[in-house]
Image (spheres, helix red, strand yellow):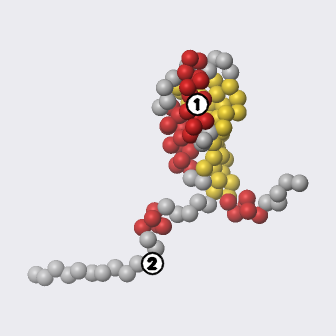
Amino acid sequence: MPISIHHCVTDSLIATETRNPPPTHLHIASFIAHVRPEHMCKLKDWLALSQQYEVHAEDALGKLVLVTESQYEQHILQRLDELRAQTGVLNAALVYHEQIALDELATEEPPL
């Protein structure tokens, strides 16, 4: 029995366009991290080098409040995992997440 080969006609999108659609939202998230105080300086250096986090609060006992933003929600989760994996980090947790539609940001009036 001969094998029949069917050719499928699809639209002209390339694979990455269907798998990675363009961003539609800005994701803003904050984390709280508990860090061994003796590792705080090294962690803050790592945070500064990564340029993906802003330190909004800290104390001498090893607590940090961090803010990050991305156009993809998955990046927020990856950053949380990266933070947890750093030496001296006892725990890190997501405490706030907001998503804002990019088209809403484009239509907002700039502040005076």
**Which x, y percent locates residue 34?**
58, 24
Q: Examine the rendering and report whether any part of residue 47 can be seen.
A: yes
Whether the residues at callouts 2 and 1 have beta carbons within 8 Å, the answer is no
Q: Amino acid at mark 2?
A: Ser
Percent x, y of residue 28: 65, 46
Q: Quadrant of residue 54?
A: top right
Quadrant of residue 1 in the image?
A: bottom left
Please provide percent x and percent y for residue 33. 59, 28
Q: Residues within 10 Å of mark 1 (few under 14, many from 20)?
A: few
Residue placed furthest toward the right: 112
Measured as percent of width and height from the top left, residue 25 is found at 63, 56
Q: Secondary structure at mark 2?
A: loop
Going by the picture, which residue comes out furthest to the left? 1
Kindly identify the residue that appears in the image at 52 percent across and 63 percent down.
21
Kind of residue at disc 1: Asp
What is the CA distance from the residue labelled 2 to the residue labelled 1? 46 Å
Please report the residue visible at 59 percent of the width from the left and 18 percent of the height from the top: 37
Vertical comparison of 27 with 51: above or below: below
Residue at left 58%, top 60%?
23
Q: Residue at x 68, y 54 (%)?
A: 100
Q: What number is the disc on residue 45? A: 1
Disc 2 designates what residue?
A: 12
> Closest to the observer: 75 or 48?
48
User: Label 2: few (<14), some or many (≥20) within 10 Å?
Assistant: few
Which label number is shown at residue 35?
Answer: none
Which numbered mark, 2 or 1, is in the foreground of this view? 1
Q: Is residue 81 above or below residue 91?
A: below
Pick the front one: 25 or 3: 25
- Judging from the image, what secondary structure is the residue with disc 1 in? helix
Q: How many marks?
A: 2
Residue 90 visible here: no
